[in-house]
Image (cartoon, coloured by chain):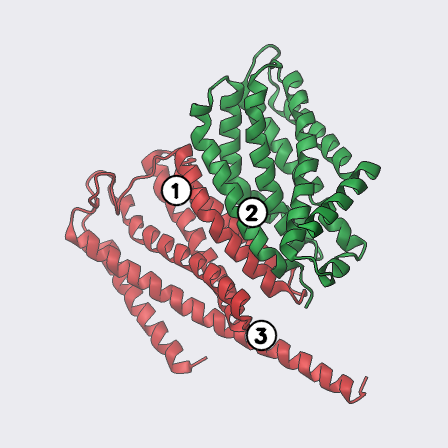
Amino acid sequence: MNKSLNLWLGALTALLMVAALYMVFVYVPTEADQGIVQRIFYFHVPCAWVAFAAFGLVAICGIFYLWLGQDIWDDLGYAAAESGMVFCTLVLVTGSIWAKPIWGAWWTWDSRLTTTLILWLLYGGYLMLRAMADDTPQVARFAAVVGIVAAVDVPVVVVSVRLWRTIHPAVLVTRQGGHGLEDPRMVATLLVAMAAFTAFFVWLLILRFATLRMRTRLVTMARELNLAHAAAGDF
Amino acid sequence: MSGFVAVLRKDLRLELRSGESTIALVALSVLILIVLVFALDPVGGVRDASTAAGALWVALIFAGMIGSTRALLAERDNGCIRALILSPLDPGALYCAKLVAAFIFMAVAEAAAVVLMVLFFNLDFDARLLRLAPVIALGALGFSALATLLAAISGRIRAGDLLLPLLAVPMFVPALIAGVKASGAALAGANFGAMAQWLKILVAFDVLFLTTGYLLFEHVVGED
């Protein structure tokens, strides 16, 4: 991977992250009803956005892989699933930390919590498949299919779980149609945090993608070398 | 179409002669129901429709996980899958034949499980069971569609038996929620109107997974 791109992305992420931390802990006013705990929201929402984007990317890469058969899509999908899993875990953890003082319980079977948990399990399964099928030559196609099927599943999960139950606060788009962030400083903080986590995700994704590309090249070279040796009668 | 019929007929004939899948599925369903009776301990005389519905669906997914995909996995054990792929048979037709076989095995096991559920949970044999039938049929169809596609993957991986439930259970969650709710309503004597929203989800789930399974199956059975 391009070294200067890596450096620039890392620097940008660090800068945005420091700005986001400053805004979350110093700049933004404390929310009137929930108090200090509400500040975790500025990390929680960007993590959720990044996790969803990553899982969408997994499905898109799966489609492109099955369509074009280029292993670059396979590597990108794998990198996206791994990074997405990290942020999805963070969503569940930050959500629990917030829920304990506000709802009085670490976990409730609310629709968004349940949906996120199912999503986490779906992509946990995807990564388990990757880990278990590592020595199978068709692993890329299997992973592409599971990535697509999981994405197809998500809308049905969302609808069914929403019918099942919901108590999660609707902050970004409230049931009245407006948004629940009254102070413009809150909006600014959220936007900076969003940018910070997006940059962080892109950086992680590219680093992981570069590693996977190298691995694929290594595996291909080893295979070709074996074939060349076999053709020359070395074995 | 003729390929579909030929494969399905072969699988059903094999099943009629050996009974392997259906007997295993029925036995597993019975055992799971008994385990749940001990675990939940429904006190004698209390007619709890929602607990019974939940127990039935647990039996459906866990028995189905192990037993429903035998027709597909047997092809690999016997080394026949390569011949099937080399034959002019369309992979989509192969998928449909295997999923219909899985559906039929599951339907037989479910019929037995429903009878036992009525006995174990102290319910009645009446018209309510007729309303339960479409719910279970839709659930079993969706599960067969999903499990057949995923078993084609897990069957080719070393520790695949372990992997199948890890992939299939989270994906089946929407159908499970809808199925348990609709079954509970049916057993409590609700009319179809009260079950409609859950039946819609089951139908949507089935349509989605039948379509994706049909389209993607060739990518997981093909040899490299």
- Does residue A215 appear to the left or right of A54 in the view shown? right
Q: Which residue is mark 1?
A: A112
Sort mark 3 into few (<14), some (14-19) or many (20+) by Cα contacts within 10 Å: few
Q: Colour of chain A?
A: red
> Quadrant location of the C terminus of chain B?
bottom right
- The verdict on a common chain for dots 1 and 3 is yes
Q: Residue B157, how many percent across, how many down?
A: 69, 57
Chain whose colour in the figure is green: B
Q: Nearer the viewer, residue A229 or A39?
A: A229
Q: Residue at x 68, y 47 (%)?
A: B98
Q: Residue at x 54, y 65 (%)?
A: A66
Q: Which residue is mark 3?
A: A215
Q: Looking at the rendered structure, which numbered label has been put on residue B210?
A: 2
Q: Residue at x 63, y 34 (%)?
A: B60
Vertical relation: B59 (above or below) B161: above
Q: Residue B47, how many percent across, how many down?
A: 56, 14
Determine the CA span between mark 1 and mark 3. 37 Å
- Secondary structure found at label 2: helix
Q: Residue A222, how many percent across, how many down?
A: 67, 80
- The verdict on a common chain for dots 3 and 2 is no
Task: Give amino acid for label 2.
Answer: Leu
Sort mark 1 into few (<14), some (14-19) or many (20+) by Cα contacts within 10 Å: some
